Amino acid sequence: MNWNQMLQTMSYHLRGAKKNKIHTTEGPDMGAAFRKSGWNAKKPRTEPAHNGPIIWDPKNTLPGSLRVKPKQKLSTKSKKSQSKVKKNGHRKIKSEEVFPFSQLPSNCKLKILSYLGESDRGAAGQVCREWNILIKSSGIWDTINFTTFPLCTNPGKTHECSHECYQKYMTRVKNYMTYLGYIQPAMKKLQFDFDIGDKEDGWLTCLERFLMNCQGDKLLYARMNWKETPVKPFCVDGFAWSSREYNEMVHRHRHRQRDFIQFLELFVNVAPNVKQLMVPFDWSFRSIYLLSKLHQLETLILERYFVFHTLNQNALDELLRVMPKVRKLVLEVWCPSGRGLELYRMSSNSIETLDISQSRGFYLKSVNLPNMVSFRATRHPWNGPLVSPEHINLPCLYKVLVQGAPKLRQFNDLILTEDWRQSSCPKLEELLKTVCSCRNHKQGWSM
Ligand SMILES: [Zn+2]
Ligand SMILES: [Zn+2]
């Protein structure tokens, strides 16, 4: 029996569990968190795939048993025998019909169960007492992703999501967090999209409690969008129609930023071994200092937090100084272009990949990146007050790279020739005309 067949057979068990709902008394009931969630609601296959001679044997009373037999359709009689279910929800089991899953060593069972999505895990926990205990093993919860939790469980065609849907969504997610807190997952991957500044929703408290209950030292990858809850209906932030609204918005952003620093402090203490981090960043020196505690960090993706937020050279220098192991850096910063724009220097011995293609108004004056092999940049429309191009003299990216990136082999999707530093080839020239903002390569007003 191969993995596929086992998983297919298990999906039959799960289907039975969803119908029979075998309840156990130990620990919180995850099924309740998921029962109506529709989360990852892939329908389990109704019968195993007919690969080769091994097919579903309808004469077996134990769901999921597989036998070598020629292909045949399910007879009415056999369908009846499938429905012989004892009052307690268990079927009669003959010794020779025992599905080999039950004979596997525990670590193999856990490995198989780890392939299940969250909702199937909820159902698996209701198959029998043994599975209920297995499913609570912290080891199989290595990926925790809150971003795909649906807002609505069973939306009809005419349904429009309301505040009520969001309230129910919050209850479901928070129940799930509580359940996970009980399991103390050994998670390697974490993803969430929750506005920690929203006091009413209380995401900050929930996330903090959740983090404290996890075995965070196992965490290697984290994508933490703490600035917004995209699933929340009518979640519009970042626009202001009057000065009062603008002031309120700035006030809210500052509060959220303080919450972020508090959260980041907890995070770096709980999960010091993170290798990849993707996070909206506030560029405060406190936050940069906290990032420096992540000694294993190799990939750092810093997203834009707030439109009206600028980056100064000192903060950039400090970040590069305290991150001596980061090999891949992706920056999304929006700086006001136009008169008074700042040109940046970047210096790092560790960076091999630098991506500033999502940044706006972020122009490089010089780089000292001796190990950089890949560089990505894009020219975005002007980001600030209109100024005649004659007033702005931006350095040419080609010259910046020739001087400070001796090992560069790839620029956007272009693989560079060996002698790209001696003379710019036609393909590179073409690329520079689309991404470089110097007077030589740029025509017109767009920056
Ligand atoms: Zn809804
Ligand atoms: Zn140029």
Image (cartoon, rainbow, N blue to C red):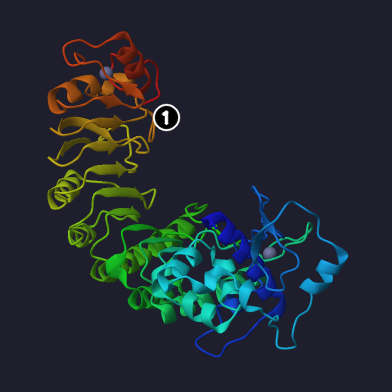
Most foreground residue, 392 or 303: 303
**Residue 144 relative to residue 345: left or right:** right
Residue 364 position by quadrant: top left
The residue drawn where x is 74% and y is 85% is 86
Which residue appears farthest toward the bottom when viewing the image?
Answer: 25
Most foreground residue, 226 or 218: 218
**Residue 219 relative to residue 312: left or right:** right
Residue 195 position by quadrant: bottom left
Q: Is the CB atom of the residue marked by disc 1 within 8 angstroms of ligand 2's nearest atom?
A: no
Please state, as top left, top right, bottom left or bottom right, where the N terminus lies in the image.
bottom right
The residue drawn where x is 23% and y is 54% is 297
Which residue appears farthest toward the right when viewing the image?
Answer: 76
Numbered circles on residues, count: 1
**Residue 285 relative to residue 30: left or right:** left
Query: Crowding near pointer 1: few (<14 within 10 Å), some, many (20+)?
Result: few
Picture coordinates of residue 438 (x, y %)? 27, 20
Residue topped by disc 1: 381
Residue 100 position by quadrant: bottom right
